[in-house]
Image (cartoon, helix red, strand yellow):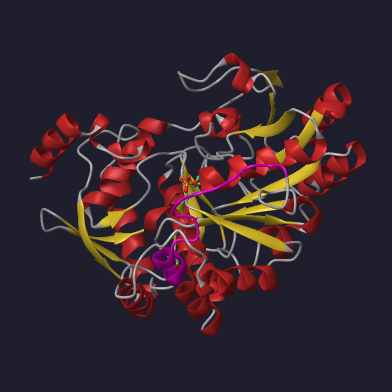
Amino acid sequence: MHDELFKRARKAIPGGVNSPVRAFNGVGGTPVFVESGKGAKIFAADGRAFTDYCCSWGAMILGHANPSVSRAVAARARLGTTFGIATPDEVRFAEKLVSLVPGMDMVRAVNSGTEAVMTAVRLARGATGRDMILKFDGCYHGHSDAMLVKSGSGVLTMGASSSAGVTKGAVADTLVAPYNDLAAAEAAFARHGADIAAVVVEPIAGNMGLVPPVPGFLKGLRALASRHGALLVCDEVIAGFRFGFSSYSSLYGGVSPDIITLGKVIGGGLPLAAVGGKRKWMRLLAPDGPVYQAGTLSGNPLAVAAGLATLDALEADPPYARMAALGKALADGVSAAAAERGVPAFCQSFGGVFTIFCREEPVRSLADARRCDTALYSRIFHGLLARGVYTAPSQFECNFVSAAHTERDVDAFLSAFGKTLRCL
Ligand SMILES: *Cc1c(COP(=O)(O)O)cnc(C)c1O
């Protein structure tokens, strides 16, 4: 049935999917088509059920079809879903984020993480009058032109886009350094310091698999940016409100960014993201300032209702300690089982977010991640899938434990993983 759906999909939609990783190109096989979800479970069009560790790439922190979020969205839908005019709930949403995220004096709602980062970069350029930005290999900041750049073989490179259709000009001002390599960032500033508008970083990387920052990396970037008059942009589209009821950079990073981007969790499963930061920067946005940014559906009432309901639920019953404990049990179990059978894989995790890396050494950068055995990853992925566990269909992505996952789910995961290893 999914084969038939995928055939139809491929005729009408490029690659059969509306976002590339869904196509299973990284693992092979026919992608899953989901009909519905409830809590930690998803139900496919062909009748299969899975325990879901994708959770819409972390957006569904409360699990699927959370009753209070569903109620809030349904109630809002009856009252009209967009006006192109300001609404009271947008104010409440902004006030909530401002009160919870240190260094976020003001915030603007947008529709996607891509837009949030695009605006952050424009803001940094507008604020400093400089053109260049420094990003890190393996970090993903959405699909805007300037951010679609990767480095060559682990060394600092310039101007090589990782997508067709991006002009040389659009990436000429994007510098790339390896993640967790402060010396490379220092070298970039030594050479281009007077021209760098911003350092853009995932304070804990989630788009090459889960890669936490090494001690001193974020603080070093903060110091570098300050010394050279550049802005520090922390892209927390995954990390914000994922590891605690605030930003990762304030809870764990020990740094105060100039600009913070949020997405995924704060939208409660609807298209909603945000860019916020220090007042002196945020006031540069139109209509108060010269940096233009706008959106027909920005601060969309339906999305804001889902976001507010999600934040309210997280506040009323914080799931963070529980998610972290489940994530740790899962990661420890996976690593132990792989070691016991002599399979070169281990689980890298933090706070309920995890990646099974198919190599034996820790992964600190994209160069490390690229050394993984992706064929082995595919076999593990399909072994888990066949046993009712949906994980990321790519070695270079994270998995997410939600507030709806239980110890039984983790036991079932480890049982499926053990059986998968025995069948390799
Ligand atoms: C998902 C993601 C984005 C892009 O967000 P979209 O809503 O998919 O546009 C940007 N930055 C990071 C760190 C992300 O994980």
- Report whether 7 appears left or right of 370: left
- Residue 264, horizontal then vertical, whole percent: 48, 57
Say if the magenta span includes residue 299.
yes
Question: At x 43% / y 67%, what residue is drawn?
Answer: 301
Q: Residue furthest right?
A: 227
Is 342 positioned to the left or the right of 47 in the image? right
**Quarter of the figure with residue 407:** bottom left
Is residue 41 placed above or below 224 in the rendered structure? below
In this rendering, the count of numbered labels is 0
* Vertical side of 190 occupied by 299: above or below: below
Quarter of the image with the N terminus is top left
Q: Is residue 332 visible?
A: no
User: In the orientation shown, which residue stands out farthest toward the bottom?
Assistant: 316
Q: Is residue 65 visible?
A: yes
Q: Residue furthest top?
A: 168
The span picked out in magenta is 290-306
Magenta highlight: main SS = loop
Q: Position of residue 359 (x, y in %)?
A: 50, 37
Residue 372 location, x and y as percent?
48, 33
In front: 133, or 359? 133
In front of the other: 92 or 414: 92
Quadrant occupied by the C terminus: top left
**Image position of 261 with respect to 122: above or below:** below
Query: Is residue 392 left or right of 33 when viewed as pictured?
Result: right
Residue visible at 40% across and 47% down in the picture:
341
Is residue 300 rendered magenta in the image? yes
User: Looking at the picture, how far across and down is residue 66, in whole percent?
Assistant: 35, 74
Residue 107 in the image: above or below residue 343: below
In terms of image quadrants, where is residue 368? top right
**Residue ID at (38%, 71%):** 405
